[in-house]
Amino acid sequence: MSDDRRSWTRTLARSFLFVAVLTLALFATCGVWPPMVAVESGSMSPNIQTGDLVVVTDTDGWTVAAADGPDIDTVRSPDGDPKFGAPGDVIIYDVPSRGTSVIHRAHFRVERGENWYDRANESYLPPDADGCDDLRNCPAPHGGYITKGDANPYYDQVSGIAPPVRPQWIKSKAGLRVPELGWIRLVVVGRG
């Protein structure tokens, strides 16, 4: 084997080793697998962009989880600090009937059977909605979170993206955004 080829092979092996160690360290720190997600759409613009890599954490983070589910700050949480440009945790959730994960902001929590129309921000409802009967998923078919992409005009539950997000569907919370680095993953998996 030539010296150039050996040098290239060593460099490639070191790069893979570095990425593996970094990924395992993130997993150990964040408590969730995978510890990073690549953002596939612009639904969270301008705070999180298509192609960004987002490091995620367990929904409990480093705090004590609520007795009834994950520790999620909503837009309406009294002590919610701004995250990614606005109040409320940005959560990553899977709906069983959907093929891909969703990364959107948690706005408020609803209970099963709740008429949540009056609690909703009117700006995120269709202009012709005059009450609960005019909205999908109202009354709430089950307890969960009302969510919305920052760039989307309506709540996910109104637009048909998801019913109220059950706590067990929440995989993780967004913790840190690395601009543009997610494009590598998106290209590799054929989504970029």
Image: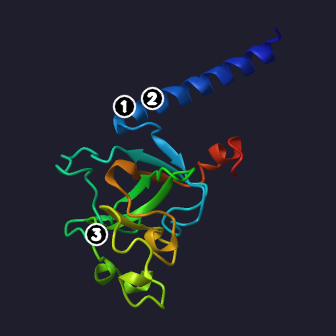
The residue to which callout 3 is attached is 113
Label 1 – label 3 distance at C-alpha: 39 Å
Q: Residue furthest top?
A: 1
Q: Residue at x 50, y 56 (%)?
A: 102
Say whether marks 1 and 3 touch (CB < 8 Å): no
* Amino acid on which disc 1 is placed: Ala
Query: What's the image's color scheme?
Result: rainbow
Q: Earlier in the sequence, mark 1 or mark 3?
A: 1
How dense is the environment of label 2, judged by Cα within 10 Å: few (below 14), some, or many (20 and up)? Answer: some
The residue to which callout 2 is attached is 24
Q: Residue at x 34, y 43 (%)?
A: 58
Element carrying mark 3: loop
Query: Which label was assigned to residue 28?
Result: 1
Q: Residue at x 54, y 53 (%)?
A: 98
How dense is the environment of label 3, judged by Cα within 10 Å: few (below 14), some, or many (20 and up)? Answer: few
Between 132 and 49, the residue placed more toward the observer is 132
Element carrying mark 1: helix
Say whether marks 1 and 2 touch (CB < 8 Å): yes
* Amino acid on which disc 3 is placed: Gly
